[in-house]
Amino acid sequence: MSIRRRGTEIAVLRAIGARPGQIRRMLLAEGMLLSVVACAVAIPLGMLLAPVVAVRFRDFGAVSVAFEVGYRPAPGLWTLAFTLAMALTANLISVRRALRIRPGDALGETPAQGRRLGMGRLLTGLALLAGAGALSAALLWEVIPPEAPSLTLLQVVTVCLAVAAVGLLAPWVVLVAGKLVRPGITHASRVGGYLAVASVVFNHRRYAGAVASLTLGVTLVGVVAGTQLFYNWRRASDAVRDLRADHVLRPAAGASALSEELRRRILAHDGTSAAVGIGSIPAAVSVEGRPLAPNPPPFSATMFTGDITQALDLSIRGRPPRDLGEGEIAIDDSLAARYGAGLGSRLRIRFPEWPRALPTR
């Protein structure tokens, strides 16, 4: 955006003898310097804010209560490299456009609106926007199963399609919005308002840069907030579908479960047919005596007391959970497939609270 605003000055430099290579090196060095300064400010600031964000994520239940923030040089170096690559790409594109302005136009102060907007760009932007809407609808209406391994990839693709569509359609948004507000602004201010709207409509390609940046920020914030709300809604929808209970009690933030004494008191209350206690604890699993992997995938064991089948609709193969004996557990199908376990497999489960392993069958 800065280079595009200085297009006339760049053309003047060319008119007085500056070569395109000199201008290109000057602007690329400027972009690299700004990127280094930005990373020097952002990385330490991110290190200060990361523990605060981690606490909020633990409170929301988005990460395990055992999650801790660590600091290593590799993420900072990757951030710097990625930022430099983005700045280099953006500078090359902007410099290429700036060098198209003829020096004669700058000396004669000839206003230039730029090339006409092509229909190909419009159609491409609309197609990308339609694709983002279709993927969003598929995710919202569960056309794609929640347990599908490609769910996260499809969400990233949806965001990328929406962002690209915003960038392609921004000039039309500025042009149409300027024409729509022209009557009202002109009526309120016949001279200043008319000239302001006329300038925006005439230079809609240039103003599209600012509009696209603002819209991109709003889009990203909306995607983050909408994704969190989507997961909350889906989680609540699954709970309503699977949970058979009149009341649900949840512990305060930071606590893993309610006390067993409270469950007994609820069960002893008149009119209570069943009370089930459910808690979650992080664990590590190995099958058939194989050693634990160096970086095992995250796994949570569900600890319950009472007859869980009276509270949850479970698809069970083998014996029901209430018939499990000492040293026996029930394992989820997806987890069993991940570890290659089946009915009768010997599992070794390690809980962080206990230093010893519990062999179970």
Image (cartoon, rainbow, N blue to C red):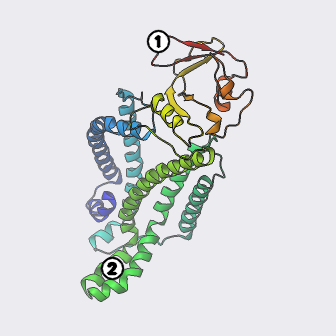
Comparing labels 1 and 2, the label whose residue is closer to the camera: 1
> Where 56 sits versus 26, above or below?
above
Q: Amino acid at mark 1?
A: Pro
Question: In the rendered view, does 123 fall on the left or right side of 114?
Answer: right
Point out the image quarter for the N terminus.
Answer: bottom left
Q: Residues within 10 Å of mark 1 (few under 14, many from 20)?
A: few
At 47% from the left and 72% from the top, the residue drawn is 116
Label placed on residue 55: none
Amino acid type of the residue tagged 2 in the rendering: Val
Please report the residue visible at 35 percent of the width from the left and 63 percent of the height from the top. Answer: 210
Picture quadrant of residue 201: bottom left
Q: Which residue is mark 2?
A: 197
167 left or right of 195 in image: right
In the displayed structure image, the side of residue 228 where residue 328 appears, left or right:
right
Q: Are marks 1 and 2 in contact (CB under 8 Å)?
A: no
| Residue 357 position within the rendered picture, expressed as x and y whole percent measured from the top left | 54, 12
Can you give x and y, in whole percent of width and height, for residue 257 in the image? 46, 32
Decide which of 152, 305 is in the foreground and name it.
Answer: 305
- Give me the C-alpha separation between circle 1 and circle 2: 71 Å
Q: State the count of labels.
A: 2
**Residue 24 versus residue 267: which sits nearer the camera?**
267
Measuring 62% from the left and 42% from the top, which residue is drawn there? 150
User: Badge 2: few (under 14), some or many (20 or more) residues near its Cα, within 10 Å?
Assistant: many
x, y percent for residue 78:
40, 34
Between 246 and 146, the one lying in front of the other is 246
Q: Residue at x 75, y 27 (%)?
A: 318
Q: Residue 1, can we see it? A: yes
> What mark, if any, has residue 355 been given in the picture?
1
Label 1 or label 2, whichever comes before in sequence order: 2
Q: Give the quadrant of the C terminus.
A: top right
Q: Can residue 115 be seen from the camera position used here?
A: no
